[in-house]
Image (cartoon, rainbow, N blue to C red):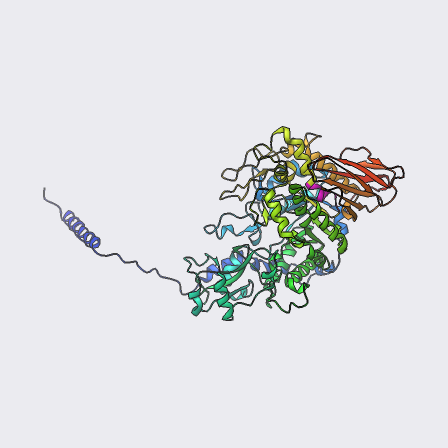
Amino acid sequence: MPLTLHAKILARILALTLVVLSLMACTPRREVAQPSLPRAAPGHLQWLERQSLLGAAPDLTAQVSGSELLWRNSGATMRPHLLLEAAPNWLALHPYSLASNQVFFRALSASPLTKHMQQMGFQGLFIAPAGERGDIWTKDLQPVSDGDNVVSLRFDAALGEEGDFTRLAEQLEQKGIQIGGELPPAATGLGPDFFLQARRATRFDGLYAMLPVPQKDWHLLPELPDEWECLPLRPTVIESLTTSGLLPPLLYRDRLPWATPGGWAVTGEVRGADGQNRRWVYRYQGHPLRPVLLWQDPSGRARRIFSAAAIQHVGLQRQSLAGLRMEALMGLDVTGDSSHGHNSDQYSPGLEALDSTAREIHRYGGWAMQDDVLPPSLTPTVLAGATDFTREAAVPAAAALALLCEDAGPLADIMQRLLASGVDQSRLARGLHQWQAVDWRPLLDLPHGSELIQKAQKAAGATTQSMRLKASPAALAALALGLDVTAAPRSEYNAALRQAVLLLLSWRLGLPGLAFISPQELTGALALDVSTADHPFGLTPLWNAAGHIPGSAPPLPLVFGPLEMQWADSGSFLHDVARLLQNRQKYGLATGKVLQTIHEPPGCLTVVSSLPSGGYWLLAANFSSQPQKISCALPRRTTKTQDILHGHAVTLDSNGHRLALHLAPRQARHILLDPSRHIQHQGATP
C-alpha cells in the first residue's frame, strides 16, 4: 500500500534526525558555558537577611528602644544571691543528646520529669544549646554538629517552635522552676550573616573578623572548588599576608596556652552584590566553619546581635539565666607592650564583651553566667566585672585526675588558690557541660600542669597529647576501677561505681555556688566514642523514652538505669543525689563560704564551708583505692552532727573540736555540723 503524504514527511524527518545524530557522535563535545549573574541575586540577599542574626536585631530592639522597659532595672545591679536562694540546683539538658518520641520542647512539656523536678531537688532547668544550627547551611561540608554553631536567634527546628517553648516556660513558671539557656556564642556557625558579609552586603560589613585578599595575592591561597568550602591557612601563607600588611601581627590570643585552637581560614571565590569576585580570610575558633564575630568593629554590628539576643532571651522568653560564650574573643587583639606581665588587656575584647552583655541582661531582669572553659587565674578578673556567675572548670578536672591517679594534690592546690585569691565561691557555676568530657586545660595554671595532664591521660589509656578526655563521670569511674564498657553495667560493680560517681559529683554538690547535673550523670550513662551523620554522641532517654530515634546514634549504656525506674526505687542513685540537692537548698549551701581545706592523709581532701544561718557543711573525700581515716579540726566547738546521706551522727572528740571519719575507697561523705542552728532555706522568687 503506498505511503500517504504525511507518512512520507515523517519518514524524511526521521532519516534526517538519524544523520544529525550520527554526525554529532563523530564531533568532539564542548562544555556549553552556563549564563552567570553579573552579581549576587538581590532577592536572595534579601531572603538571607531575613534569616540572619543581625537581620533579626531591629525588630527585637524596637520593642525596647524609647520605652519604659529600659528603666525597670539597672545594668550595674548585681543580685546573684537572689538566684542562689531561688534556684541553687539546675537540671542541665543538652537537647541533641536526649532521646524522645517527639520534638524536644513538646516531649519535655509532656514528660513527668518536669513534674518531679522539685521533689528531686531541682529549682532550675538549663537547656543548651538551643539556637538554630549552621548544619542546614553547610550540610555537605561537615557532619551534624553538637549545636554550638548557632546561626540564628530562632530555636533549632529539632527542638520545636517558639510556641512550644512558650508553653514549656509557662508550665515551669507555674511549678516555681526557673529556666535558662545560652545566647549565641561569639564563634557562630557558617550561615546567613557570614554569607552576606562575604557577598559584600554593606549592612553586614564589620560583623565578622574577616578581610578581602587582594587578587595579586590569590596565588598564595589554596585552590578551593566551592565558595564556602573553607580551609585553615598554612603558617607560611599567614606570614606572607602579615608581611604584606593584610593580616595583623601576632594576636594575644595566639599566645594563650589554654585558648581553644583556631586561627585564620580562607573562603573560595565569592561573588559579591557588586558583581566582584573576592576571597576572604577570617578568624575561626575550633573549626573553619566557626567564624568569630568582631566585637571591636566601630559599626557595633556584633554588639547589636548580643543586645538583641539578651532582649529575646530574658525579656521576651522570660529565661532567668543567660549563658555567655565569649572565649573566642579573649585575646582577639594585637599584642602590645608585654613588659608589664599578665594583665586584663591580654583578654581584650572578651572581657569588655562579657561586661557589656551582662549589663544588658541585668537591664531586662536576668542573670549573666560566663560558661566557657577559662583558666582559674582569670576567675577573679571575670567576677570583678558585671558577670554574676562564671563556670568553674578547674575543680572538676582536678577531681577527675584525683580519681584516675589517686592523687588529690592538684585538687587541693586549686582549692587553696581559690581561697587565697578571695574568690566568692558562691558565684561559681559548677558542673556545667561536664558530662561529655573532661577538659584538662585549666590544669595548665598549676606548676607542671602539662605533666599532670599527660599523667591523667595515660591513666585513662588515652593519647597523652590531648587536652580533652571524652568520658562521662560513669566512664571515669569505670576507668578508675579497671572496668571496660562491657563489664561496667554488670550488677556486681554497681555499688562501687555509684560511690565513685558520687565522689566526682560531690565537688559540685558539696560546695557553694550554682550546681548543674545532667540526666547522663543521674543515669550513669557510659559516654562512648560513637557518632553518626545525625548525632555526634550516643543518646540518653529523657523519661519513658523506649529505644532511640530511628537513624540516630544508639542509646548509651546506663549503669544506674533510666530516670523513671530509679525514681520508683527509694534506694537508687538518683535518690542519693536528690537527698544532697534537697539539703543543699534547705541549708543554703549555695550562698555559703569555703573556710578551709585539709589535704591529709594522702589521697584525701576535706573542705569545710560555713552556711548562711550558722553551722557548717563538711565534704570529706577519699580518692585512693584504700580505706582511709581522717581526723579534722573544726572551726568551732560542735555539739551535733549529721551524715546527710545516711542520717546518723558521726564521731566527735570529748570537747567537740575534732571530728573523726572513716572513708571507704573512692568515697565522699557530706556532714552537717550543728544542723539545729540552721533556719530552713525556702528559696525566693527572682
Picture quarter with the N terminus: top left
Span of residues in magenta: 504-511
- Residue closest to the eye, 272 or 446: 446
User: Residue 389 magenta-drawn?
Assistant: no
Q: Is residue 202 above or below residue 556?
A: below
Q: Residue furthest right?
A: 655
Residue at image coords 83%, 35% = 651
Residue 58 seen from this side: no
User: Residue 510 magenta-drawn?
Assistant: yes
Residue 510 % position (x, y): 74, 43
Place residue 309 in its image quadrant: bottom right
Residue 305 % position (x, y): 60, 59
Place residue 293 in its image quadrant: bottom right
- Residue closest to the eye, 349 or 50: 349
Is 645 left or right of 456, judged from the image as shown? right
Residue 37 % position (x, y): 40, 63
Is 123 left or right of 304, judged from the image as shown? right
- Residue closest to the eye, 113 or 325: 325
Residue 325 % position (x, y): 62, 55
- Residue closest to the eye, 575 or 367: 575
Place residue 99 in its image quadrant: top right
Report the number of numbered marks: 0
Q: Is residue 634 above or below residue 261?
A: above
Residue at image coords 49%, 65% = 200
Q: Residue furthest top?
A: 492
Q: Main secondary structure of the magenta part?
A: helix
Residue 283 seen from this side: yes
